[in-house]
Amino acid sequence: MIPVNVVTGFLGSGKTTLLREVLASPRFSDTAVIVNEFGEVGLDHLLLEEVEEGVLLLESGCICCTIRSDLKETIRSLHDKAARGDIPRFARVVVETTGLADPAPILSTIAADPIIRNHYRIANLICTIDALNGARTIAAHDEAGKQIAVADRLLITKVDLAETDSVETLKRQLARLNPAAPVATSSGSGFDADFLFGADVGDELRRAAEVQRWIASAEALEREREVPSHEHAGTHTHHHGAHGGSHGGLHGDADTNAFVLRFPEPIDWTAFGIWLTALLHAHGERILRVKGILQVAESQTPVVLHGVQHVVHPPMHLDHWPDEDHSSKIVFITRGIDEQRVRRSLNAFLAKARALGPRSEVA
Amino acid sequence: MCGLCGLLGTVHWTETSAHPNAFTGAGRRTIRAERLHRAALVNQALAAARLKLSDFQATSYIVRSPTGKQAIVDDLQSVWSAVDQLRGAPIDVLDEAWIAQIEGSEP
């Protein structure tokens, strides 16, 4: 399976700089790059062409739903050409999106097409954020917040041009929008390409480490939210109120909330699947990210689950639990979804499955 | 490749557990039993909407409305779209009434 990375980030946030450097390194030299031309960013094309042959330009301006077929055809034709020997075989594909693009349709294109799905897998989604303008962009553009919330890796660029304080503030803001993604910083060079592109959960050798990262972030999120846990209703207001105030009234992320559901008992995989598909059907657009490690009743080893909006990756196994704690932990990053309600709903349905279990089991 | 990952052949991620070798635990179900279990659970979720799901030949599902309208679908995700169409509104698992119904009703 060939990994496909998606690089998102607003105009001028440093996507091209990142790509140019990463593609120049020997480890990523056999990467096929799909870029998207959008307005003045024809420049992107020139820059990329210098470092990589076989760069393909999508014809239309935007990579959202309307031209998903372009992306599909592009990946398919790359695949065909490599198979025929017209272009060198490549070990990785990177899709660079336009600044405004919603990454979700890209993922669904890869996940839905029968040919692509069987040869390619979705790898890390990287979002670049400009240290100078990041906060402003997030406040002004809904899409920016979403790009950050669905990403696997966040890269703050141009940190050398910004004050340390504002970078720290931006980091805190990013952690609120997406507590599950590690944040890296750069000043235009020396990217940790392996960490950004290479270390993803779809790679069997890297899976355990990546899941451990998820668990760490889930636990950190739990701790953070536990602080004012005595007044449950107050947690929410406190959380947003405090941050909204400390960041010059940025309310662009006010609705984005992340929470962790934890289940100490094994859960019924079927019931969980039914519940999650129903939830995503009704609210998929507002469930930006679901990530978790599950202790399912049917398996002794943990199952790793992750999804972006309506796209849920095929569940994966881990050989063993990373530590003694075998409880299921699921991180949700949502927009305006009530945590208590999600918790109650899933609890109720799992309880129903437990009650139903023995009777529906056919010997 | 293990059954749970079932990338070849199966389409929807929830279908993967239907493979008999998907799970190594003792409580393993056959494909048919898994699908019956699934249908029984979906029916719990559909009860409030007075819709019913049944397994069709272990290949598809049939969703039926109380007035006799029906739809045949391939996987769980499509069940919810079919429910949408038959009912005119999605089943909302975050709806207070739905949660109360699941919490309250007898299995």
Image (cartoon, helix red, strand yellow):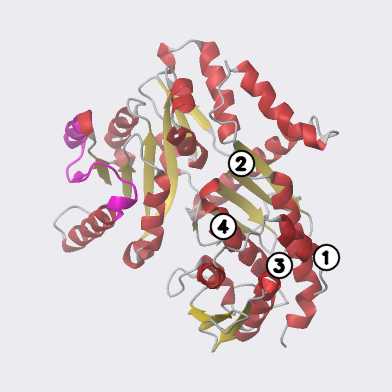
Q: Residue at x 48, y 38 (%)?
A: A146
Label located before the other in sequence (2 or 3): 3
Decide which of A30, A13 is in the foreground and name it: A13
Q: What's the distance in space between the residues labelled 2 and 3, CA to CA?
A: 27 Å
**Which residue lies under the disc numbered 3?**
A268
**Which residue lies under the disc numbered 1?**
B104
- Horizontal and vertical percent position of residue A57: 19, 44
Q: Is residue A177 above or below residue A241?
A: below
Q: Is B9 situated left or right of A23 in this image? A: right
Decide which of B59, A183 is in the foreground and name it: B59
**Placement of the C terminus of chain A among the 4 image quadrants:** bottom right
**Placement of the N terminus of chain A among the 4 image quadrants:** bottom left
Q: Which residues are magenta?
A: A41-68
Q: What's the distance in space between the residues labelled 1 and 4, CA to CA?
A: 22 Å
- Horizontal and vertical percent position of residue A346: 71, 58
Looking at numbered disc 1 in the image, what kind of residue is underneath it?
A: Gly
Looking at numbered disc 2 in the image, what kind of residue is underneath it?
A: Gly
Q: Are marks 4 and 2 on the same chain?
A: yes
Mark number displayed over residue A347: none
**Which residue lies under the disc numbered 2?**
A336
Q: Residue at x 45, y 70 (%)?
A: B11
A246 in the magenta segment: no
**Which residue lies under the disc numbered 4?**
A282
Q: Is residue B18 above or below residue A317?
A: below
Q: What's the distance in space between the residues labelled 1 and 2, CA to CA?
A: 26 Å
Decide which of A237, B70 is in the foreground and name it: B70
